[in-house]
Amino acid sequence: MESHSKPTQRKRRGPKARRVHIAPPIRKQLTRSSRASTAAVRDSLRANIVLMAGQGISNAEIAERLDCSVRTVRKWRNRFAEQGTVEALADARRSGRPATVPAAVRCELIKLACDRP
């Protein structure tokens, strides 16, 4: 007799998460940033991602706990793992057309616009 057992479901797994090591002074900065009430939400999220990654938590678990996408977790985890500094969590420079008005002229125009006539 043949036994009919249920086929086992295999969990779909993504790429293996990079190991993150956080030096104590950097951990202190990240903890402060994650708890600051005046910090931008994105900065707090990024700090929490890195702190949880440093504890060895999987990307999927971090994404679920912080209510964000696995792709977001992977991006910040990898960037921090490569650079190992708090500056790694800052927004990268974006390409774009160079400014046509010099900064000094722009500041002068803003000053004129804010002055009383």
Image (cartoon, helix red, strand yellow):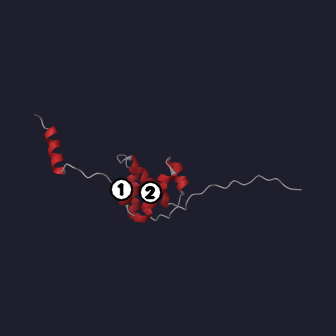
Quadrant for the C terminus in the image: top left
- The amino acid at mark 1 is Ala
The percent position of residue 67, horizontal first and vertical second, equals 50, 46
Q: Nearer the viewer, residue 115 or 95?
A: 95
Q: Is residue 35 visible?
A: no
Q: Position of residue 88 (x, y in %)?
A: 38, 60
Helix, strand or loop under label 2: helix
Q: Residue at x 46, y 61 (%)?
A: 78
Q: Which mark is residue 76?
A: 2
**How far is the residue under mark 2 from the one under mark 1?**
12 Å
Helix or strand or loop: what does disc 1 sit on?
Answer: loop
Up-down: is 81 above or below 103?
Answer: below
Q: Which residue was labeled with disc 1? A: 92
Mark 2, other Cα within 10 Å: few <14 / some 14–19 / many ≥20? many
Residue type indicated by callout 2: Trp
The percent position of residue 93, horizontal first and vertical second, equals 33, 55
Determine if residue 24 is in view: yes
Which residue is rendered at x = 16% and y = 38% of the image?
113
Percent of width and height locating residue 27: 41, 60
Q: Is residue 32 left or right of residue 114?
A: right
Q: How many marks?
A: 2
Q: Residue furthest top?
A: 117
Q: Nearer the viewer, residue 102 or 12?
A: 102
